[in-house]
Amino acid sequence: MAKLEILIAPDPRLKKVAQPVERVDDEIRRLMDDMLDTMHGARGIGLAAPQVGVSKRVLVVDVARENEDPRPIRMANPEIVWESDDSICVEEGCLSLPDQYAEVERPERIRVRYIDHENEIRELEADGLLSKCIQHEMDHLDGVLFVDYLSALKRKMILRKLAKTRRQDAVSV
Ligand code: NI
C-alpha cells in the first residue's frame, strides 16, 4: 500500500463531479487500499478519491476508535436509496480543510447501495457517525465540501485562511 497526497482546499480538483467506475478491478482495489492507508496515516475516518486527485466515485471510511480493531469499508458508485426524515446537526471536519470545523445538518439514518471491493453490489444501513461520514464522503464525489453548507461569508473566511496557510508553507520550504 502507498500513501497518496491529500489535496487541500481551495483546489479546483475538489470541485469536480467524479465519474462512476465501470467495475471494481485490481486498479480500483489498489486505489481503495492506498486511500485507506492514506486516511489512517492522516488519522481521518473517511476519504474520497477526488481528495487524492482521482476523479472516480470511490470512497473509504473507518469509524473504529483508535483502541478498536479497524473496520474499513470500501465503496464504489455509492447511492443513497433511503434516508430518514429526522436529521442531526453535528460538527464536521475534513482532511482537505485542515483544522476547520463547522456544524452541518444531515439525515440521521441512511441506506446506501454500492459496489464493494469484490465487485459485489451491497447495501448498508448506517446511523450516527458512520451515516454522517458516508454522506460527507459522498458529497466529495459531487465536488461538495462541508463549507458549501455554510454562509458565503463563513465559507470565504475559511478558504482564505487555508489559502494563506498554504502560501506560508510554500515560503518556508
Ligand atoms: Ni472531507
Image (tube, rainbow, N blue to C red):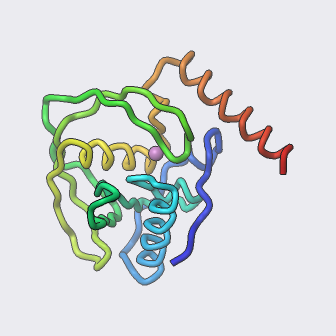
Residue 20, position in %: x, y? 41, 62
Q: Taking 96 as reference, is 151 above or below it?
A: above
Q: Residue at x 51, y 62 (%)?
A: 41
Residue 102, position in %: x, y? 43, 27
Q: Quadrant of residue 156?
A: top right
Residue 144 shown left or right of residue 6 in the figure: left
Q: Quadrant of residue 9?
A: top right
Q: Taking 144 as reference, is 72 above or below it?
A: below
Residue 19, position in %: x, y? 46, 59
Q: Residue furthest front?
A: 67
Along the line of sight, which residue is nearer the eye, 31 or 3? 3
Along the line of sight, which residue is nearer the eye, 3 or 117? 3
Q: Taking 32 as reference, is 25 above or below it?
A: below
Residue 9 shown left or right of residue 86 in the figure: right
Q: Residue at x 55, y 45 (%)?
A: 96
Residue 54 shown left or right of residue 74 in the figure: right
Q: How many marks?
A: 0
Q: Residue at x 37, y 43 (%)?
A: 136
Q: Quadrant of residue 97?
A: top right
Residue 70, position in %: x, y? 30, 66
Q: Residue at x 39, y 49 (%)?
A: 137
